[in-house]
Amino acid sequence: MIKFFLIISFLLASTIVQGQESRRFPMEESSLLWKITGPNMESDSYLFGTMHLIKKEYFLFPRKLKKIVSKTDQLVMEIAGLPNQTDVMKYITLDEGSFFDFFNTAQIDTILTWAKANFFMEESVFRSAFSKIKPFVIIQMATQIQFIGKTESYERIFSEIAKNKGVETKGLETIEQQISFFDQLTNKQQVEMVMSGIRDSEKSIDLIIKMQKTYVSQNVDAIYQVITDDGGVISEEKLKFLDDRNANWIPQIMRFVKKNTFIAIGAGHLGGPNGVIRLLEKKGYTLTPMNL
C-alpha cells in the first residue's frame, strides 16, 4: 500500500448515444494528448496527462500544447488553478491531538532521527513545526525535498497561460476532496504509510524516477501499470484514488466538453481499464491520440 501512497491524484445528457466498446487494454497507441469528439459538442476538446512532480529533463511542453490551451474556452484541471497556501494549511492541520499521538516511542525516535538527517531539524524545532500537521504531509515533503530546484509544473504553466489569455479555469475537485482521501485512512494505515516511507525512502525515489521515465514514453497504460503494479493486487485504496475518482469525473467532463475545453489531469487517470479515456469511449465519445 505504501508504494501507491508515495506516487504520488473523478447527469448524463438524455441525448447521449449508446455506449460503445472501448479500446482494448493495454492499448497500442502512445500519447499524452488526446482529441475528444462526440455528441453535443460545439467543437473539439482535448485531454492531456500531466505528472504533478516531474524533473525538468522529463517535462514535455512543446509550443503546440501552449497554442491549443491558449485557444480553448476553458481549462479544466483536478483543482482550479494553483492552491492558496492558506487553504492548504487549513486542510493539512489536525483538528485535535498531535502528530506524535499516532506513533509509539520507538517510532517517534525513528522519525526524529530521520527528520534530522533529511530536514536538518533538531528535535525541538521538528516537534514545534510538525506537532499539528497530519502524518501524510511529512512523507510528501520528504519526497519533494529530493527534487527542489529540479522540477517543473504543468499546473503552474497551464494556469499562467489561462490567466494571460483570459481562459476560464475550472476544477474537477477541491483541495478538501483531495486531502480527504488521506483523512479516510485509519490511524494504523497512516502510521504504516509514514514508517514504510521512512524505511523505503530510496525505493520511493526510484519509483518516482521510474514513473517519470515511463511518462516520457507517453504510454498512458504503462504509466497506469507502474502506479498499480503491486503483485497483481489492486487494493481498495487504489480503487478509491484512481477508479472511483475517474468515474466521478466523467459526468463533469461530459458537461465541460459541450464547449471547447482543455482538460489536464494526472496521466495515471488516463490509462487503465477504468481510465478516463475508456470511460469516455463507453459514453460514445471518440478519443484520438495526437502527436506532441
Image (tube, helix red, strand yellow):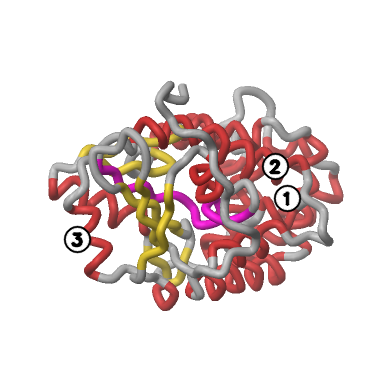
Q: Are marks 3 and 1 in contact (CB under 8 Å)?
A: no
Q: Amino acid at mark 1?
A: Val
* Residue 154 can be seen, yes or no: yes
Q: Determine the CA span between mark 3 and mark 2.
A: 35 Å
Residue in front for this viewpoint, 259 or 226: 259
Please give the name of the residue rendered at 35% of the width and 38% of the height, measured from the top-left corner: 80
Q: Which residue lies under the disc numbered 1?
A: 194
Mark 3 or 1, closer to the camera: 3
Q: Which residue lies under the disc numbered 3?
A: 67
Q: Which mark is residue 239?
A: 2
Please give the name of the residue rendered at 18% of the width and 45% of the height, measured from the top-left corner: 163
Q: Position of residue 102 (x, y in %)?
A: 77, 37
Magenta highlight on residue 151 = no
Q: Earlier in the sequence, mark 3 or mark 2?
A: 3
> Which stretch did the figure color magenta?
260-272
Please give the name of the residue rendered at 57% of the width and 50% of the height, measured from the top-left corner: 22
